[in-house]
Image: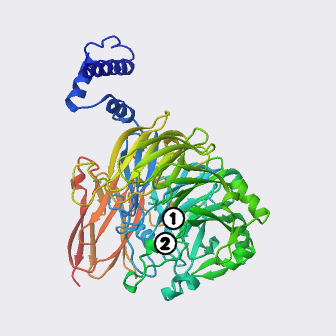
Amino acid sequence: MTARTTRSHRTLALVAMLVAAACGGRNGGSSGGGAGSDVLALMNARGLSEQDVTAALKTYTPTGKHDEYYTFASGGHGGNVIVIGVPSMRILKYIGVFTPEPWQGFGYGDDSNAIVAQGFRGGKEITWADTHHPALSETGGEYDGRYLFINDKCNPRVAVIDLHDFVTKQIVGSELIASEHGATFVTPDTDYVIETSQYPAPLGGAYAPIEEYDSKYRGAMIFWRFDKQKGRIVPAESFAIELPPYMQDLADCGKKGSDGWVFCNSINTERAYGGILEGKPPLESGATQNDMDYLHCINWRAAEAVAKAGKTETIAGMRVIRLQTALDENLLAFVPEPKSPHGVDVTPNGKFIVVSGKLDTHVSVYSFEKIMDAIKSGRFESKDPYGIPVIGMKDALHTQVQLGLGPLHTQFDAKECVAYTSLYVDSMVAKWNFCEGKLLDKLAIHYNIGHLMTMEGDTTKPKGKYLVALNKLSIDRFNPVGPLHPQNHQLIDISNDKMQLLYDMPLPLGEPHNAQMVKADKIKPIEVYKPIGLNPYTNEVDPHATTTGKERIERTAEGVHVYMTSVRSHFSPDIVRVKEGDRVFLHVTNVEQAKDATHGLAIGGQNINVSLEPGKHVNIEFVADKAGVFPFYCTEFCSALHLEMAGYLLVEPK
Ligand code: K7E
Ligand code: CUA
């Protein structure tokens, strides 16, 4: 028997088994023909291996079937969030966050414009973002499925998305810092959303010559207070801690026994700032001289008390615990971490802190207990140039494991002590045991992995089963689309000892950086807005909402108010007469409650395009500054007479 026929026989048996299982045994025993041989023919025709077929069977989700998990992935430069079903890897939605999103009608003329405008900085319109790290809200260290946060690395901002309708409700930002990266990370009960600066600058947006980097430039960690009841960040109750001018990178909050602490890795403790044309080494070589950088251990619970006691200084509207105060109050200690690290992840049991050294082949596993011991007994090895106590490496380390080249981020399995770390340079995922410090398995992935995620893999209760590798710039992987390549999410089965690659999913928006994956049954979105006239941004019936029969046009001193309803298949009023130069207020209530009765309202020449989900109310304001005839129409194919769902805005010349 040749190898080829052996394979065919095995495959045929496998397929027959699968078909038999799928058909409840009705085709059992028909391994010589029928459906089994059809599948085999299909496999041969498409050149699929047995592995391909098992991978397909593990991911294929037939029509009408829902996915087991939701992934919330950052949209990178798209400034949005991508919602993906797992294991099918089907994209379910783009959520507009910092960037207007036309399908959601987000940022095109209604109340959502005010949300996008919350993200403007210093009066500058900013409508893009470099989103990096989405974070689901937690209760008791587990995802509660209620809110999602995401950051903008370029213009330090944090957004709040309410998962009851998948809409961005708030954007906050502080000019205390000039850039960030270590965001968003939540405390185990989502009391705070953490945002940490990356590239040091004078606090509050002031100018200082770069030669005064050491004395005038600073980092900071912002603790945005989150009100879970209201679902909003409360800037007035938020505070920050000043940090030395290292490049603070990512952070993770302690959990269980280590709750109350937050850990943040850093790079460039050399405090290099480039200057290539000025005869200095480029930033990246200046920043990689030291063998060790500093893991920042911050007692946020104590910091909260210090802020409440008023031991702060207000800079750019933010209460800031100055570095000296942080030292006096013992809020901060350092642990050495090798070398230009990236990523810090607290284990599900809260006992260990895993740091990857980008330029080191190891992951370092620190013991929270040892760190606390050293702090409590004042056992420090040295101080950094800013007087911050540094714990000795050996006094903090639990173990180090050699995993491979360019370790970055770590996520955890449902199996105790099992972790997965991305290896950027090797383009691999390493599976290892953080208790015993042992490498277990390695899987080659496509190319340049950054973050990875497992099911609820950064909570106190990871769910195992799947891992997604978030790979950057997918060379040669998909049909070519020009010099800018899509990114690639790769789905991996981690339910067995050996990892198995299942699926490649191109993402065409921007480097997706990080994602979080949550059990689908934890997300319980509404299907329609109730009661009719609800404004999603106030979560109350809008004072301008109207009902069928009450539609009207009122001229007031401030302009023309139009109280409009939408229902299949007309807007009422459908003729709106105004005068050139009038300010127009369109108050539109979709009075329907059927799940599929979403309308849209678009007006030519005005950059107005809103989405009217069932029950929703929107307020649109614009100046009719040009005389003319402007048709408006519904943008969702809502009924057989959808094309007829239209009207006229008549702007009479002055
Ligand atoms: Cu791309 Cu988390 Cu911003 Cu690592 S970060 S890869
Ligand atoms: Cu309403 Cu189309």
Within the image, what quadrant is residue 606 found in? Answer: bottom left
Q: Nearer the viewer, residue 500 or 644?
A: 500
Q: Position of residue 285 (x, y in %)?
A: 44, 72
Give the side of residue 140 with respect to residue 61, left or right: right
Q: Name the residue: 57% across, 39% down.
A: 414
Residue placed furthest toward the right: 377
State if disc 2 and disc 1 touch (CB < 8 Å): yes
Q: Is mark 1 within 8 Å of ligand 1?
A: no
Give the Cα distance between marks 1 and 2. Answer: 8 Å
Tag of residue 591: none
Give the side of residue 374 with respect to residue 479, left or right: right
Q: Which residue is mark 2?
A: 287
| 71 vs 23: above or below | below
Q: Secondary structure at mark 2?
A: loop
Q: Residues within 10 Å of mark 2 (few under 14, many from 20)?
A: many
Q: Is mark 2 within 8 Å of ligand 1?
A: no
| 21 vs 470: above or below | above
Q: Nearer the viewer, residue 273 or 542?
A: 273
Lower sequence index among marks 1 and 2: 2
Q: Amino acid at mark 2?
A: Ala
Q: Which residue is mark 1?
A: 340
Q: Amino acid at mark 1?
A: Ser
Give the side of residue 589 with respect to residue 46, left or right: right
| 102 vs 405: above or below | below
Q: Name the residue: 36% across, 66% down.
A: 100
Q: Secondary structure at mark 1?
A: loop
Question: Could you tell me if residue 113 is visible in this image?
Answer: yes
